């Protein structure tokens, strides 16, 4: 569990001890501003005002004790500065910052509850030598192919202790399975959640062998075996809405993974229809033929997991499946509030510097969020992040030593109160309350 003194030391170390050596390693030279001043200016400036241009950043520099013009800010947006900010980001993600496990008994059964996903940021085509995209058609009314250059941000987020593994960056054309997260071993007894894009038999078998649990949707077409016979799903799935099925199956044509629970529940017609519409739109936009089996299976929610019944009931498994969306909310926070994929300039290196600096700001913001609200299972990260962003000038007073940095952090943390928790609803339960209310053998 991390504390305010630990986060304070991490900030000082990152910006004031490591920023300089990392800058010199990539070939940067100090001009009018020292390296830690540039780092504070760009990271804190874009954190506080995500739409800031060079003029706004120059004005923000006044709070850091800097007297600079927008031209002096603009001249720092170079390839070397981008390389340096990337190195600083990579160093920041190595810092271990976590909180005490949230008080949700369903999650506390595991050593960690890790949700993994990736999100793509399209970049100007001039950056395709740095981050190559997938290509694709040109948007109407423009001359830019938005996917000629793109970077993919991958994250593994612990819903129990709050630790953020990442963000790690890779070329937009690379699949999430190529992320460096593949090299980070998960603790034994942890639970891993992901979407269908991560479905590979070799990976799931590897997790089982490491003592890591997995839970994810069934991928249509994957061969299942039940009682030594190849399973015909459409023959055994329930017919009544709300009816459930559970089978102990072997997964893969060669029965690569044994002892896997298949959980199924028939969904209402409106849910199935909405799924079919989304699938048809996906197939149309990606120019892929429709798969009749996929359309048929939209009538059920299908889960595969190696978590034993003694730890996880049918109801709890479906609650945890919904919890996977917490990482989507994290990316939503970064893109909608921090404007991670938006910028006002047109110069490629300035844009890349902005993306890296904003990502670094999101890492630091997450450290503060863990201090401020992680003990509240019903917290709203979107609401808390908005409050914390408004308190960046307080943090500036700490880094400038007008206040002790620890006191500045305490003031930021203390500003989080009221309207930052998701209230109980009488209709659709929030994910936290669904996890809290889920009952079954795992909690007895």
Image (spheres, grey):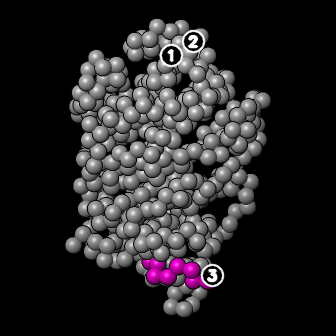
Q: Is residue 44 magenta?
A: no
Q: Is residue 255 magenta?
A: yes
Q: Nearer the viewer, residue 269 or 413?
A: 413
Any mark on residue 253, and which? 3
Q: Is residue 234 above or below residue 414?
A: below
Q: Nearer the viewer, mark 1 or mark 2?
A: 1
State how far apart marks 2 and 3 are (Cα). Answer: 62 Å
Q: Are marks 1 and 3 in contact (CB under 8 Å)?
A: no
- Provide residue 285's location: percent of width, then percent of height: 69, 49
Q: Is residue 352 above or below residue 57?
A: below
Q: Nearer the viewer, mark 1 or mark 3?
A: 1
Q: Residues within 10 Å of mark 1 (few under 14, many from 20)?
A: some
- Provide residue 156's location: percent of width, then percent of height: 46, 53
For residue 118, say whether it is visible: yes
Mark 1 vs mark 3: which is more N-terminal? 1
Q: Which residue is located at x 61 percent, y 16 percent?
A: 75
Mark 2 vs mark 3: which is more N-terminal? 2
Q: Is residue 21 above or below residue 189?
A: above
Give the quarter of the image for residue 148: top right
Range of residues picked out in magenta: 253-264
Any mark on residue 33, and which? 1
Name the element at disc 3.
Answer: loop
Q: Residue placed farthest to the bottom in the image?
A: 228
Mark 1 vs mark 2: which is more N-terminal? 1
For residue 353, say whether it is visible: no
């Amino acid at each position: 569990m991390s504390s305010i003194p630990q986060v304070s030391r991490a900030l000082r170390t990152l910006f004031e001890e490591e920023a300089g050596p990392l800058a010199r390693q990539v070939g940067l030279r100090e001009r009018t501003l020292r390296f830690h001043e540039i780092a504070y200016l760009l990271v804190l400036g874009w954190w506080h005002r995500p739409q800031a241009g060079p003029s706004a950043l120059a004005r923000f520099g006044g709070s850091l004790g800097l007297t600079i013009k927008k031209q002096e800010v603009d001249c720092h947006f170079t390839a070397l500065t981008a390389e340096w900010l990337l190195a600083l980001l990579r160093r920041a993600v190595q810092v271990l910052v976590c909180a005490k496990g949230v008080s949700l008994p369903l999650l506390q059964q595991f050593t960690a509850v890790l949700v993994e996903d990736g999100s793509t940021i399209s970049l100007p085509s001039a950056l395709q030598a740095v981050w190559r995209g997938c290509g694709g058609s040109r948007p109407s009314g423009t001359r830019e192919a938005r996917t000629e250059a793109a970077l993919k941000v991958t994250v593994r987020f612990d819903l129990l202790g709050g630790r953020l593994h990442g963000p790690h960056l890779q070329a937009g054309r690379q699949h999430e399975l190529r992320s460096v997260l593949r090299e980070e071993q998960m603790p034994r007894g942890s639970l891993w959640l992901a979407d269908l894009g991560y479905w590979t038999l070799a990976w799931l078998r590897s997790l089982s062998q490491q003592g890591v649990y997995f839970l994810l949707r069934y991928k249509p077409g994957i061969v299942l075996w039940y009682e030594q016979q190849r399973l015909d799903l459409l023959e055994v799935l329930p017919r009544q809405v709300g009816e459930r099925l559970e089978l102990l199956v072997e997964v893969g044509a060669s029965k690569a993974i044994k002892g896997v629970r298949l959980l199924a529940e028939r969904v209402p017609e409106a849910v199935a229809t909405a799924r079919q519409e989304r699938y048809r739109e996906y197939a149309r936009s990606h120019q892929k033929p429709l798969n009749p089996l996929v359309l048929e299976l939209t009538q059920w929610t299908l889960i595969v997991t190696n978590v034993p019944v003694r730890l996880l009931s049918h109801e709890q498994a479906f609650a945890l499946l919904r919890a996977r969306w917490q990482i989507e909310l994290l990316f939503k926070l970064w893109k909608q509030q921090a404007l991670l994929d938006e910028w006002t300039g047109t110069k490629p290196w300035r844009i890349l510097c902005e993306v890296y600096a904003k990502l670094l700001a999101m890492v630091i913001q997450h450290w503060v969020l863990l201090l401020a609200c992680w003990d509240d299972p019903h917290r709203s990260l979107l609401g808390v992040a908005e409050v914390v962003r408004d308190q960046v000038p307080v943090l500036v007073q700490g880094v400038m030593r007008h206040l002790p940095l620890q006191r500045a952090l305490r003031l930021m943390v203390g500003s989080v109160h009221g309207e930052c928790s998701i209230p109980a609803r009488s209709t659709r339960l929030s994910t936290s309350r669904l996890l809290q209310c889920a009952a079954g053998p795992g909690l007895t």
